[in-house]
Image: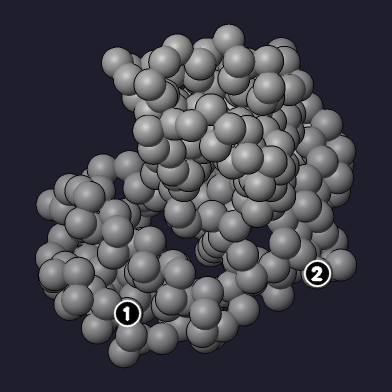
Amino acid sequence: MIHISHLTKTFCSASALSNVNLEIPDNAIFGLLGTNGAGKSTLLRILAGILNADSGEIFIDGEKLTDTSKVRQMIFYLSNDQYYFPGATPQTMLFFYEKMYPGFDRERFLKLLSDFQLDSTKKLHTFSKGMKKQVFLIAGICCNAPILLCDEVFDGLDPVVRQSVKNLLQNELRCRPFTPVIASHNLSELEGLCHHIGILHRGGILLSREITALEYGVHKFQCVFSSDEREFLFHALTILRYEQRGFLTTMLVRGDFSEIQTILASRSPVCYESLPLSLEEIFIYETERIGYDIKELVY
């Protein structure tokens, strides 16, 4: 587990992180959400040892994060803008990461490059941003470090490659001890991927929850009624979101699932059904409950 305690970082007079307290569990995909400038990149860079915090502590499996190579070999950092040697190729980076990470899997690295149709001998500076991200993500997987820090990893990827990257992360999680931390400003990019979510806002942690805990007690229904039932529904149910399009009513409702069904059935709808919640819908109640609009925090 990664345990972050009272972490603070300022640049000149600007506060990037302010008293951040956060726990990131092992062997689960953690999504770190926040708008641009919320402090996501700063937090990841401190975790990776690139920046030093002004105050606070970080522990990994109970061991304090320091500059020792033992701790550093537990972490691979994938920045939003990849850094590499002038004239480097994926093959060049293979040699570099073999020196940095004793567990680096050369054969798997080359195979995954081939699977993603990336030329291991081609100069990295000729690659698109999305292709570079794929190369370094593959390196992060193949170094076999237990912690992978990803800053906007899906930025620049087309939908097909984005899904392939998600599959790669999920498969890796099933095969070995592995904790990916994915920072993003876009909820939809993390849809169906993360087990835990945290929202970083103005340098502080606004919310940190397990997805299943967020889902508990919030349900989405689509209904068709033969008459206007809006007044009754708002009186009988705890409605978080309500949308009416013609005869079709879509609602986000908090409460017991069976009780909601009983109330809806009592109005003799033409039809009604329960729908899966999106990640944005899951957060609507949680963020509004503490006084924020989710659309102002992530988009």
Residue 208: image quadrant is top right
Q: Position of residue 214 (x, y in %)?
A: 67, 44
Q: Position of residue 97 (x, y in %)?
A: 43, 74
Query: Which of the two discs, 1 and 2, labels the residue nearer the N terminus?
Result: 2
Residue at x-position 42% and y-position 15%: 227
Residue 162: image quadrant is bottom left
Per the image, label 2 sits on a secondary structure element best described as loop
Write down the residue under mark 1.
109
Q: Position of residue 49 (x, y in %)?
A: 65, 53
Residue at x-position 31% and y-position 89%: 107
Total number of numbered labels?
2
Residue 3 lies left or right of residue 89; in this view the side is: right
Q: Nearer the viewer, residue 176 or 212?
A: 212
Write down the residue under mark 2.
61
Rendered position, 117 above or below 283: below
Would residue 219 be visible to someone looking at this image? yes
Residue at x-position 20% and y-position 69%: 116
Image quarter in which the C terminus is found: top left
Rendered position, 126 above or below 241: below
Residue at x-position 26% and y-position 43%: 156
Inspect the image, locate mark 2, and give the three-letter code of the amino acid beneath it: Asp
Answer few, some or many: residues within 10 Å of disc 2's Cα (few below 14, many 20 plus, some between 14 and 19): few
Image quarter in which the N terminus is found: bottom right
Per the image, label 1 sits on a secondary structure element best described as helix
Would residue 41 be visible to someone looking at this image? no
